[in-house]
Amino acid sequence: MPPEAFIFVHAHPDDETLWTGGLIATAAASGARVVVVTCTRGERGEVLTVPGTATEHLGFLADDGEALGAYRTTELRAALNALGPTIEHHYLDELPTTNYDDAPTRHSGVWRAATQPGTSSLASLGTMYRDSGMAWIAPGVAGPDPRFTGGFASVPVAEAASRLVPLIRDAKRASGRVVVVTYGPDGGYGHPDHVHAHRVAASAVNLANNDAVQLWEIATDGDIKVPVEPVLVKVLTALRAYPSQIQNIKLASASDGAEGVLAWFELSNAVPQPIRAHEAYRLRTSA
């Protein structure tokens, strides 16, 4: 039987679509409860400014993290609406921490109730988790950016995980079987926030301590395959909702010579990236 609820844990706005857009759209269309949790607002992301497009005026965002985070929040709303209008969204720092007995507590600043399904906000919370930034340490491999400290990657795992536990437990009580989806231990390519999101999600699943909760990790070649073609239009529409981050989105053609690729897009490095016919996930059986 398919799970009745999926909880996706991602580091920044746009990651949910880039990494798991096919599964999110497929699960939402199936009637499952779909919850997307974003750990930061992407305040230190690179900003695309393409002359002659709607992005040419966005250069100022590169020097204003708060403004960039707010802008990416609006992009995220549009992307989630494209993937499925019933999708719930929360920023991780907007969820209250708990003592693992479902009693919310004040911890590390202010907290407030989670946003309603289909909404999100840029709240000025004392606990706001910020984008940690990254630096390229090898071709295709990222690591910490020495210029920045105090981002999400430095938040204690126990604190961040405690915000996810009641969400997982609530989904279990309401829906039955639950799948939590996030990156593998390397974060996909080493971004500190991706790596930390994995640690937090894995810890929260362990703390939820229920056999009906599974952890799926994004994988290059996993044992779970999700076809993307049936929801490709939704995924492409969601990608186009991120003009500050994603450009040159186009369908693949026979002349591309890349088997199993449905479409292409580019990030700030202008290197074509594929949208493949399947997303792959690996069921993690131990922490």
Image (cartoon, helix red, strand yellow):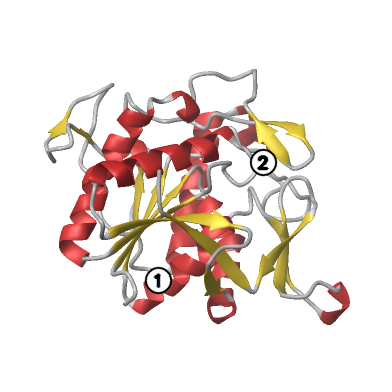
Which mark is on residue 240?
none
Point out the image quarter for the C terminus. top left
Q: Among all residues in the image, which is located at the extreme front? A: 286
Q: Residue at x 52, y 32 (%)?
A: 131
Task: Let me know if residue 83 appears in the view.
Answer: no
Q: Would you say 96 lies left or right of 45 here?
A: left
Q: Residue at x 54, y 29 (%)?
A: 132
Question: Is label 2 in a helix, a strand or a loop?
Answer: loop
Tell me the amino acid under the disc marked 2.
Val
User: Could you say which quadrant of the image residue 243 lies in?
Assistant: bottom right
Q: Residue at x 20, y 42 (%)?
A: 113
Residue sitting nearer the eye, 58 or 273: 273
- Which residue lies under the disc numbered 1? 27
Q: Give the image location of residue 34, x and y in percent.
A: 34, 63
Question: Is label 1 in a helix, a strand or a loop?
Answer: helix
Q: Give the image location of residue 97, x and y in percent.
A: 23, 33
